[in-house]
Amino acid sequence: DRSNAALIEVNDLKKHFRRRGGNAVTAIDGIDISVMPGEFLVLLGPSGCGKTTLLRCLGGLEQPDEGRISLDGRLVFDSAHGVELPPERRHTSMLFQSYALWPHMTVFDNVAYPLRARHQKSSVIKERVGAVLASVQCEDLADQYPDDISGGQQQRIALARALVPANRVVLFDEPMSNVDAKVRSSLRQQLRGLQREVGFAAVYVTHDQAEALDLADRIAVLRDGSIEQIGSPREIYRRPRSAYVARFVGSVNELQGRVTAIDGTSIAVDTGMGVIHAEKREEQLNVGQNVLVMFRPEAAAISASERPEREQNSWSARVVDQVYQGSFVEATVQVNGVEVKVIDTDDRQSDLIGGLVHFHIDPAHVMLFAEAPESA
Ligand code: ATP
């Protein structure tokens, strides 16, 4: 049944580059992914982790050394059997950061181009281009030239041009990085809306974690050419598998510590701040082990009473900074000489800087990672 089959299937993909001087760089180090119809996969990671290379391998702009790629039910690359289809035979749309509309063509002709290249009838082209322009809210711009419209509008037109052939696989490489924040957010919404309508499978490269959380059904966090973790935005944010993932998505407080006690439900870790208790999860940790303790700013709270109650994970803290963010305040507090960030959702309408507060960390949201600090 085709509707249940992955539209993008990648198996054990590898790609090396030879640098000047002869050193080999491993850009893709054995990647497996599959993307379902209507699914939006975001490739996230720092510069150089291999996101763009992976996307270019999918589109046929880069030749992998090993592995297999199937797109929309067709084998387009297989190193073992010498299969390698050129980009134009992969039935795949690509949208890049530099979207380069043709300046001598009107908006209509730019968007119509992929259909004319396929020798579609002009009545079909007219209808289809009109519908796609309407879906990106640019139907009024059909007769304009690219130089006469705004950057955000140009990007909408480029999106329309990528989607007009109705390919079932669409690849994006940081397509929003040249437009301002407001346009970006409305483009994202349109993109997701169009995807729901058309049901294509999307792979979207970004290094912007907010964009990833906003767009993705699943996020693959890449590290040195491998997938460090793949999962829903919530899984990636709340259950990062490593300190690398925790640091890359969202902001996080981190302290070095040593496990001092483990019982059935909780793990006690001695840190520079004091003993922090974490709810016990599946990690295999031992007493005496060095761990990295991490918690998100919203996993902690402050209240304006000075006296710490005698309970776990509670301290007296001094407020050293407050940044008003509208729906919350991001406070920096000092606890036994250690500075941490905490989200304060209580709008007290008063400045706490310099004052003493009661600081608490929720043990259910303390993350422990058994990795040596220098390799983290
Ligand atoms: P960015 O966000 O900066 O684009 P990226 O995650 O997309 O980074 P890639 O561009 O895929 O990373 O690069 C992965 C690795 O492969 C890097 O070490 C890079 O230097 C190397 N690389 C990429 N393209 C080439 C090339 N044409 N020749 C040599 N090395 C390359």
Image (cartoon, rainbow, N blue to C red):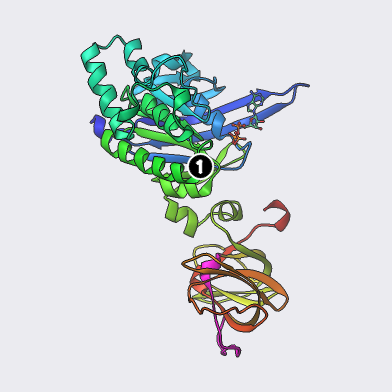
Quadrant of the image containing the N terminus? top left
Is there any visible trace of residue 366 in the rendered image?
no
Picture residue at 34% right of the left edge, 31% below the top: 138
SS category of the residue bearing label 1: loop
Q: Is mark 1 within 8 Å of ligand 1?
A: no
User: Is residue 301 highlighted in magenta?
Assistant: yes
Residue 210 percent across, percent down from the top left = 49, 50
Quadrant location, ligand no. 1: top right
Picture residue at 45% right of the left edge, 25% below the top: 148
Within 10 angstroms of label 1, few (less than 14), some, or many (20 or more) residues?
few
Residue 310 percent across, percent down from the top left = 57, 90
Residue 317 percent across, percent down from the top left = 64, 80
Q: Count of labels shown?
A: 1
| 19 lies above or below 233 | above
Q: Nearer the viewer, residue 110 or 19?
A: 110
Q: Which corner quadrant of the image does residue 261 belong to?
A: bottom right
Picture residue at 37% right of the left edge, 15% below the top: 113
| 249 lies above or below 64 | below
User: Is residue 195 highlighted in magenta?
Assistant: no
Q: Residue furthest top?
A: 119
Q: Which residues are magenta?
A: 296-313
Q: Residue furthest right?
A: 21
Q: Nearer the viewer, residue 139 or 191?
A: 139
| 224 lies above or below 256 | above
Residue labelled with disc 1: 180
Q: Is residue 19 left or right of residue 243?
A: right
Q: Is residue 213 left or right of residue 166?
A: right
Is there any visible trace of residue 224 in the rendered image?
yes
Residue 232 percent across, percent down from the top left = 42, 50
Picture residue at 49% right of the left edge, 45% below the top: 181
The secondary structure that dominates the magenta segment is loop
